[in-house]
Each structure stands twice: as C-alpha cells, then as structure tokens.
Image (cartoon, helix red, strand yellow):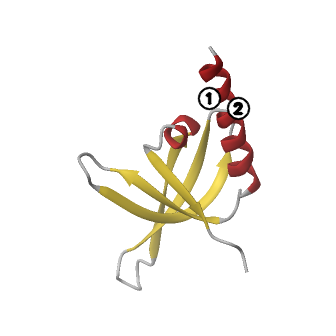
Amino acid sequence: MSDAFADVAKMKKIKEEIKAHEGQIVEMTLENGRKRQKNKQGRLIEVYSSLFIVEYSSDNGSSAEGTSSYVESYTYSDILTEKNLIRYFDQD
C-alpha cells in the first residue's frame, strides 16, 4: 500500500514542477516504440489538473506561408512512468 502513496506524492511533485515552468520552452522526449525516441521542442502553454499542453511550431520552409503551430497534450502519468520525459530550458 505504501507504493501507492509514494506514487501519489511523486505525481503531486511532477504537477507542481510542470506548473512552475508554465510558459517556458521545454523539450519532450517521446517514446516511439522499440528503442526509438523522438525529441520535440515547444512551449508549455497550459497546465490543467490531469494534463498539460505543449505548443509546437513547424517551419514549412516557405517564407510566404511562415510557420504553423500545433498542440499536443500529455498526462502526468506519462512523466511518472517515464513513457515521456520533459526537460526545461531556462528563460533568459
């Protein structure tokens, strides 16, 4: 039973840490199947009680079209189970 309490405490700490970095640039390392990972940089734009949202910009290469952006949501349990990793960049 103590493992469940430890996981709840870890989840609370993860939520607080992510909330503290809202608005900052983050790098997400996403598990893409067997021994494959994908790194993406974006801005942590919103934090909710059960998930958080990261906005990514994709450069189309054409200056006429500019950049387009898209959002992806992640759960705190993804971070807890280390399915996804998050790295914060200091704001200068």
* Left or right side of 75 for 30: left
> For the point 55% across and 39% down, which residue is it?
80
Q: Amino acid at mark 1?
A: Asp
Q: Give above or below for 60 relative to 43.
A: below
Position of residue 21 relative to residue 79, above or below, is below
Q: Quadrant of the N terminus?
A: top right
Q: Quadrant of residue 61?
A: bottom left
The front one of 63 and 91 is: 91
Residue where numbered disc 2 is placed: 9
Q: Residue at x 47, y 44 (%)?
A: 82
Q: Quadrant of residue 91?
A: bottom right
What's the mark number on residue 30?
none
Q: Residue 32: percent from the left, percent from the top?
A: 30, 49
Q: Residue at x 71, y 35 (%)?
A: 12
* Rendered view: 66 above or below 79: below
Assign a secondary structure to mark 1.
helix
* Residue occupying the point 68% across, 22% down: 5
Q: Give the residue at mark 1.
A: 7
Three-letter residue code for mark 2: Ala
Residue 57: % across, % down: 48, 68
Q: CA distance from mark 2 to mark 1?
A: 5 Å
The answer to whether residue 6 is above or below residue 69 is above
The tally of labels here is 2
Which of the two residues, 53 or 89, is positioned nearer the viewer here?
Answer: 89
Circle 2: element type: helix
User: Looking at the image, do the residues carrying marks 2 and 1 touch, with CB atoms under 8 Å apart?
Assistant: yes
Residue positioned most to the left: 34
Left or right for 12, reference 63: right
> In x, y percent, where is residue 52?
61, 44
